Amino acid sequence: MKQTKKIPETFLGVGYTRDRAGLPLEAVRVPVPRPAADQVLIRIAASSLNPLEYKLADLNFMGRTPPVVLGLDLAGVVVDVGDGVSGVGVGDAVAAMADLNGDGGWVATGGSEGGYALAHQFLTVHKPTSLSFPDAAVLPMAFLSAFAGLYRTVQAGDTVYIPGGGGGVGHLAVQMAARPLGAGLVISSGSTPQSIALARQSGAHHVFDYKRDDIAAEIAKLTGGEGVDLVFDATYSERGFVETAKTVRRGGNWIVLGVGPGKTTRLAETQSPVDAILAERGAEHVNVNLLRYFSEPARLDSEARAFLQRGMALAMEWAAQGLVVPHIDQTIDSTVEAINAGLQSLQAGHGVVGKVAVIVDRDLALGASR
Ligand SMILES: NC(=O)c1ccc[n+]([C@@H]2O[C@H](COP(=O)([O-])OP(=O)(O)OC[C@H]3O[C@@H](n4cnc5c(N)ncnc54)[C@H](OP(=O)(O)O)[C@@H]3O)[C@@H](O)[C@H]2O)c1
């Protein structure tokens, strides 16, 4: 095992220290982990905020024993590698996603002390020099979510509806469909001038206001009464699911990110008419869920690993080529206060479009690109 010097024994992370503690997160001193086989240890330059992080703090549904440090999107420099790691080594600038049932790398110190997190080699890619650490850091979870929904599913020329095209996942999904995957018509939605503008800027041909417009009727007009070939719904809105299911054509695909209709509270299952609406149209209900790879380990087989690895590589490639470019709405320091305020805004569903970048190590993140 190769190892650099000066890796501290502990760092002051940000996370939850009690089961289902919810927000606010707290500062917690934890050991710097050691990489097992096929893992790398990354000194974090930048990370991002994802809704998953307040949900894990609320419900601890991955069954972890606290303390759990969050900040699962990672960009930084490899400082140690486990056995069997090849192709990425100590000193390399990388982007990665930590295991979703593992620990992340947010620090409470605003950058005066480093943050460290482990990532599997298959979820770690070299960061192109043209991409900044914050740009690389906001991509992994949101990009992989869009990728899992759309890659190998959208065919060139398809008509696609992606509600919420101003969201973290949504704006990347709109770009992916409209640009590298070559959809013929991309329709999206939002509820604020800012999110509607981001969906348009991301390449959506039509963007509706989901609070005001009859989007199913508008989509029927745009598609000659047929509906779209494919819906990718990453909004986690039970009401929204019912509306978007009505826009898919006979024999089309309705793809939902996460647990899906009737299950979004995670606490109690509710009745959802979505499957009946889809059955009427002979449309397929497809569920994509990154969490499942980590809660049901058998799913993380060699095919899934190769798929996710391809996703991480394309995240960097398409961003460097300007095809799928993350929009960073806010950049915050890695402090308990700033992270809690950012997560509270995400949880409230207002005030954030695109992504929030977290600067974990200011010198590394904003210094000369590497
Ligand atoms: N299980 C998984 O694999 C996985 C992975 C990643 C994310 N997720 C989940 O996916 C969801 C989205 O993540 P994110 O990072 O994109 O969150 P986000 O940045 O907060 O975006 C949420 C988006 O949903 C839109 N929205 C909300 N209700 C809507 C409705 N009824 N119709 C249309 N759009 C609606 C919002 O639009 P406006 O702001 O314009 O209102 C916003 O753009 C979260 O719940 C997250 O936990 C799951």
Image (cartoon, rainbow, N blue to C red):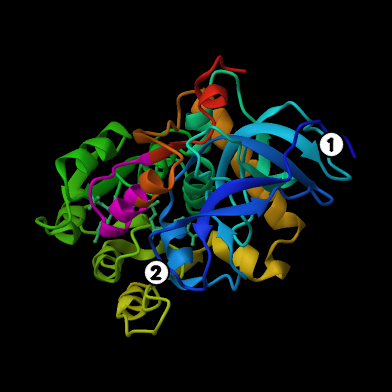
Q: Nearer the viewer, residue 116 or 165?
A: 116
Question: Quick one: label 2, few (<14), some, or many (20+) residues within 10 Å?
Answer: many
Classify 324 as above or below 20: above
Instruction: Say if residue 41 shows up in the picture.
Output: yes
Q: Quadrant of residue 219?
A: bottom left
Q: Is residue 345 shown in magenta?
A: yes
Q: Is residue 369 shown in magenta?
A: no
Q: Amino acid at mark 2?
A: Ala
- Disc 2: residue Cβ within 8 A of ligand 1's nearest atom: no
Q: Position of residue 317 (x, y in %)?
A: 57, 29
Pointer 2 residue: 283
In the image, which residues are magenta?
A: 341-355
Task: Give yes or no for contact between labels 2 and 1 (Cβ–Cβ under 8 Å).
Answer: no
Q: Position of residue 129 (x, y in %)?
A: 59, 19
Q: Position of residue 308 (x, y in %)?
A: 64, 49
Classify 151 as above or below 210: above
Pointer 1 residue: 86
- Disc 1: residue Cβ within 8 A of ligand 1's nearest atom: no
Q: Quadrant of the C terminus?
A: top right
Q: Is residue 223 left or right of residue 178?
A: left
Instruction: Say if residue 162 shows up in the picture.
Output: no
SS at circle 2: loop
Q: Amino acid at mark 1?
A: Ser
The residue lying at 29 percent from left, 71 percent from top is 238
Q: Position of residue 342 (x, y in %)?
A: 34, 47
CA distance separating discs 2 and 1: 43 Å
Residue extending farthest left = 212
The residue lying at 78 percent from left, 48 percent from top is 34
